[in-house]
Amino acid sequence: MNTLFLDAQTHLKAAFSYIDISEDIQKRLKYPKKTTLVSIPVRMDDGRLEVFEGYRVQFDNTRGPTKGGIRFHPSVDLDEVTSLSFWMTIKCAVAGLPFGGAKGGITVDPKTLSRLELERLSRGYIRALADVIGPNRDIPAPDVNTNSTIMGWMAEEYFEIVREQRPDVITGKPIHLNGSLGREAATGKGALYTLLHWVKSQNIEPENTRIAVQGFGNAGFHFARLAKQAGFKIVALSDSRGGIYSEDGLDPERIMHHKKTRHELKAMLYCDASVCDEAEYKQISNADLLKQDVDVLVLAALENQVTEKNVAKVKAKVILEVANGPVSAGADDILFNNNITVLPDVLVNAGGVIVSYLEWVQNKTGLYWEESEVNERLKFRIVREAETIFNLARDKALSLRTAAYIHGVARIAGAIKEKGTREYFQNG
């Protein structure tokens, strides 16, 4: 059975083939350190009791406490959460952060919940996992279908359990609950910084670059908004229900305003409208968006959007992975052989965890920065790591993904080696 986790591990094996690394390290990165499954009973508004499945996987903590988001989605299962925790381990190392990787989630369609049901579920998740997470153990953050409001509820529940204020236990919180300025747009902004550095290295002008964005949620919206401001032309946008296309370009801010105000669900965190409700534009499907003849295809939805089944239809010159694992391992090889550049997720979407790290630091020190300083720190770190990865890929004729994995694994291997490997103890 080819699970998502086995697919994710394929990239790791590719990196191992290019570097001399201890067998100990290869074994350590094959298995998660700790997996926790919980059931979360929730009293629904009509009096029913529903029980939801929750997960938290802490993959590796060699370089520090584990870090990773919590997603609410019907497709959440142990395989997905394990894969996401593995990617977070690599991502934190790629970004040079003093964290390991973790991920969590609940199998639920949050759009079916009321505000009160959503709050009960969020607090119940923390009650079930309070002895697993902690400011110096495992620090959650938002992910798909979770946001600052949910993080605020979760942080408050943790405070009640441990009987002290520990804002550093969760990042992505509301600003007035010790969140960080710049956190909401951080993933999209980090993706833009990466793309800008790439086009600069290739002597490409943003004004001559046409972009299609799959996944018009938080990260996809902020990327599209900022990319338009930087001079790129956004010609296509899609969400889970469909998409729109305009050769003359789209205005992401106006479209998001329309999406939010057209239909509001009772759970204030989600909108029932779709970008395809923009009738003045050509309507396309998600499958159509992947086939658009554009310069950059941005994948900001979920994993496995481009696979061996549809990769031949991709016409973009560059793929920007804002989501986690949107290109399967098999499709990744095909894209590389077809000279289509893939800017990998473990670099591109690291902006979110970088600013989460900055929020964690601010929470620990009590010293809070202006948004401009947060953005400068984000830009400095992600551009520095991008430059290293771009150079490594060019010098060794590797894909950017393999170069990114080599870069991240080298940092993890260094930390493991310092504690002693087979070679050290044999020589002793």
Image (spheres, rainbow, N blue to C red):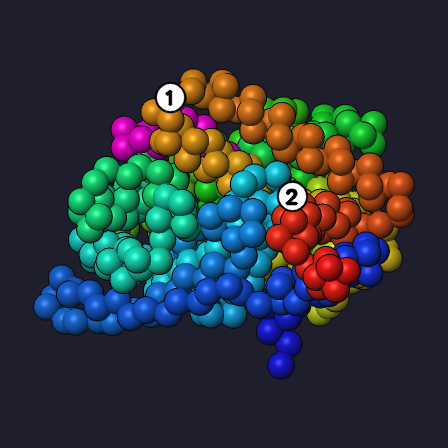
User: Height in image: 155 above or below 223?
Assistant: below
Q: Quadrant of residue 93?
A: top right
Marks 2 and 1, how far apart at CA: 26 Å
Mark drawn on residue 367: 1
Residue 66 magenta-highlighted: no
Percent position of residue 387, x then y: 75, 33
Q: Residues within 10 Å of mark 2 (few under 14, many from 20)?
A: many
Q: Which mark is residue 424?
A: none
Main secondary structure along the magenta-highlighted residues = loop
The amino acid marked with disc number 1 is Leu
Count of number-bearing discs: 2
In percent of width and height, residue 80 lies at 51, 65
Residue 316 seen from this side: no
Residue in view at x 75 percent, y 50 percent: 406
> Percent position (x, y) of residue 113?
25, 59
Amino acid bearing label 2: Val
Residue 266, percent across and down? 23, 51
The residue shown at (22%, 44%) is 159
Q: Quadrant of residue 383?
A: top right
Is 260 located above or below residue 71 in the figure? above
Q: Residues within 10 Å of mark 1 (few under 14, many from 20)?
A: few
The residue to which callout 2 is attached is 94
- In this picture, residue 400 sits left or right of residue 274: right
Instruction: Give the magenta part as a residue range.
Output: 175-187
Q: Residue at x 41, y 50 (%)?
A: 137
Above or below, 337 against 353 in this view is below
Instruction: Please state, as top left, top right, bottom left or bottom right, where the C terminus lies in the image.
Output: bottom right
Which residue shows up at 87% across the image and 41% down it? 394
Answer with mark 2 or mark 1, whichever residue precedes in sequence: 2
Horizontal side of residue 210 vs 276, given as left or right = right
